[in-house]
């Protein structure tokens, strides 16, 4: 009897310890708000994050095995698709929007430029299924993963069995994506009182708060709402944003407001990648805004900025670059996972 | 020690078995009073015909009522019915449950539609979740008819939508005291000649989706 109790208590202790070790705490700076993502429905663990990372970097998600999430969301570009106005998918097809940067996703309720997706977990379905992106469907992905020795191992480690389901796949991808937190820019260090802005950056910060903050709200540098920022419609695309989804006239030309963090890594800018340089963006807001019924009220009157003020504003925006995030090795292609699979020896201590 | 544990376990299982009563809801597709077979052609008029290949839909939040008060709600909330291979919902009810009405919904509620990836019958891998826009396809009816002027004469009704004003969730209640519940779905009342001529595709939340969901609901009839 005593022996059995000891064995049971021992097992409980080991399980508790394992749970403690495997659990990952979602850490973010004090100057950030509370995340929107409900972690109670998808508790972070090392093994699920790793599974999600493997899936993110694996072209197995696409119909012909040629395109992975990272094809258009590169870690070195803050998970955007630098140099491509419009992203491309299988069979070299060109899509019709610019791939947005991926970070600080736990603070976002809606995804895609038109807000078509209402939860991070469900976002991956869109590129997986889109004929011009991955051209695949979730059931076929699940079948491919079930046949893969690598994913048998990764699912077993993450879920204690090898069963692959759509839910598990999507939640594991969310787990990796949730770990992409950009909070180490100079701006963040100033907020944490570790350093100070230069005089020019201070001036830019004042201008930013005056002209930009209502939509690109700090500290995330987006309200993650939707706005018509006065871009003339590109008639080669005829993209009306949220209207395409809701069919409501009040949603015409409303696009998700992007963050201003990491701008140096994420060019070109806007939903169709029409501006290659930040200077062009400032030109748009000072001289190029097109009036229309749904235009953001903040842009009804032209923003006036002198040449010096523009320079100051850009200097401040550069303080939002986060090289610690962009060059974080934990976010990169997981060579060890895929290489160990090729040699058929998955090194447990290195996963 | 082991003996006592086994005895307790057996007692526990026994209590569950004795307490439960079983019920089942069967869905039977009909075409003009005959059981409809998927993939078979049925006459639509003297010259035209129709073939139904897919009928899938969600039955959710099943509850039992007596004299206007809910007496039991099934803990398994979401059931995907596929006329090709899964047409029966089996339920374990509490013993001595007495009821006069069974209620359920056709379609998924807004919680299922807006709170992330779900397991079981709600798993998006079953093809009942839109990829380009968040939300479940509550009812999927696909087939072909000579009256459809489309590629391969195909029609596709993917009915869903959880946001106002195009909410498609439909509530149904039947006066019933039996534990063996058979519900006929009169497919011929939905796929009428003029419907198939006028509408070959419904693929997004819209007033059309709401209208067809209401028609789908009206096609459900309790078989006594």
Image (spheres, rainbow, N blue to C red):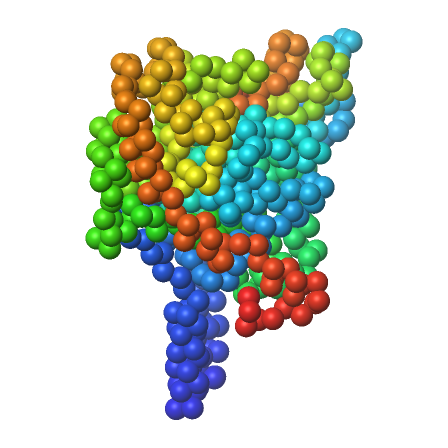
Q: Which part of the image, by quadrant, shows the C terminus of chain A?
A: bottom right
Where on the picture, by quarter, is residue B62?
Answer: top left
Q: Tell me if A346 is positioned left or right of A193 in this view.
A: right
Residue at image position (69%, 33%) is: A92
**Nearest the camera: A264 or B93?**
A264
**Nearest the camera: B23 or A136?**
A136
Q: Which part of the image, by quadrant, shows the N terminus of chain A?
A: bottom left
Residue A54: image location, x then y, percent? 58, 55
Q: Tell me if A259 is positioned left or right of A63 in this view.
A: left
User: Going by the picture, which residue comes out furthest to the bottom?
Assistant: A2
**Nearest the camera: A271 or A118?**
A271
Where on the picture, by quarter, is residue B36?
Answer: top right
Residue at image position (33%, 43%) is: A319
**Vertical position of residue B63 compared to residue B175: above or below:** below
Residue B166 visible in the current orientation: no
Residue B41: image location, x then y, percent? 76, 22
Q: Tell me if A302 is positioned left or right of A337 in this view.
A: left
Residue at image position (67%, 20%) is: B155
Residue A327: image location, x then y, percent? 47, 53
User: Going by the picture, which residue comes out furthest to the front?
Assistant: A308
**Vertical position of residue A130 compared to residue A2: above or below:** above
**Nearest the camera: B80 or A65?**
A65
Residue A201 visible in the current orientation: yes
How many marks overall? 0
**Vertical position of residue B17 compared to residue A38: above or below:** below
Residue at image position (64%, 35%) is: A89
């Amino acid at each position: 009897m005593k022996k059995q109790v000891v064995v049971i208590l021992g097992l409980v202790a080991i399980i508790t310890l394992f749970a403690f070790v495997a659990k990952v705490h979602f850490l973010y700076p004090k100057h950030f708000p509370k995340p929107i993502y409900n972690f109670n429905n998808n508790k972070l663990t090392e093994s699920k994050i790793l599974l999600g990372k493997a899936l993110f970097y694996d072209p197995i998600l696409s119909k012909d095995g040629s395109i992975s999430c990272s094809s258009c969301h590169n870690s070195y570009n803050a998970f955007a698709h630098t140099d491509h106005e419009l992203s491309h998918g299988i069979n070299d097809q060109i899509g019709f929007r610019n791939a947005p940067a991926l970070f600080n996703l736990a603070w976002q309720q809606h995804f895609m430029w038109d807000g078509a997706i209402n939860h991070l977990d469900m976002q991956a379905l869109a590129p997986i299924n889109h004929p011009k992106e991955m051209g695949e469907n979730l059931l076929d992905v699940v079948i491919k993963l079930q046949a893969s020795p690598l994913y048998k191992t990764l699912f077993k480690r993450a879920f204690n069995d090898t069963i692959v389901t759509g839910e598990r796949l999507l939640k594991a991808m969310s787990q990796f994506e949730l770990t992409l937190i950009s909070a180490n820019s100079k701006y963040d260090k100033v907020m944490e009182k570790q350093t100070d802005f230069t005089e020019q950056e201070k001036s830019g910060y004042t201008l930013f708060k005056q002209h930009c903050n209502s939509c690109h709200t700090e500290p995330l540098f987006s309200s993650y709402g939707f706005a018509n920022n006065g871009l003339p419609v590109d008639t080669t695309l005829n993209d009306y944003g949220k209207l395409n989804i809701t069919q409501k006239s009040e949603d015409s030309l409303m696009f998700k407001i992007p963050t201003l963090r990491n701008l140096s890594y994420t060019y070109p800018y806007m939903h169709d990648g029409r501006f290659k340089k930040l200077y062009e963006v400032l030109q748009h807001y000072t001289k190029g805004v097109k009036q229309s019924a749904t235009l953001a009220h903040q842009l009804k009157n032209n923003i006036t900025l002198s040449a010096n003020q523009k320079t100051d504003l850009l200097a401040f925006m550069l303080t939002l670059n986060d090289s610690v995030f962009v060059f974080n090795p934990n976010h990169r292609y997981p060579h060890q996972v895929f290489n160990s699979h090729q040699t058929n020896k998955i090194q447990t201590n290195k996963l | 020690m082991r003996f006592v544990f086994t005895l307790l376990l057996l007692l526990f299982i026994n209590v569950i078995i004795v307490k439960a009563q079983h019920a089942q809801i069967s869905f039977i597709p009909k075409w003009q009073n005959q059981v409809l077979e998927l993939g078979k052609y049925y006459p639509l008029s003297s010259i035209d015909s129709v073939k139904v290949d897919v009928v899938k839909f969600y039955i959710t939040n099943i509850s039992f009522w007596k004299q206007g008060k809910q007496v039991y709600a099934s803990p398994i909330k979401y059931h995907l019915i596929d006329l090709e291979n899964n047409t029966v919902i089996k339920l374990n009810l509490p013993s001595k449950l007495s009821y006069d009405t069974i209620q359920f919904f056709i379609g998924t509620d807004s919680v299922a539609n807006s709170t992330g990836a779900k397991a079981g019958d709600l798993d998006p891998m079953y093809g009942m979740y839109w990829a380009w826009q968040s939300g479940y396809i509550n009812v999927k009816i696909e087939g072909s008819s000579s009256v459809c002027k489309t590629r391969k004469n195909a029609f596709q009704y993917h009915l869903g939508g959880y946001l106002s004003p195009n909410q498609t969730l439909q509530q149904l209640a039947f006066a019933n005291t039996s534990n063996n519940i058979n519900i006929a779905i009169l497919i011929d009342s939905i796929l009428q000649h003029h419907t198939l001529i006028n509408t070959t595709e419904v693929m997004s939340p819209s007033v059309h989706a709401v209208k067809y969901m209401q028609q789908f609901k009206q096609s459900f009839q309790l078989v006594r």
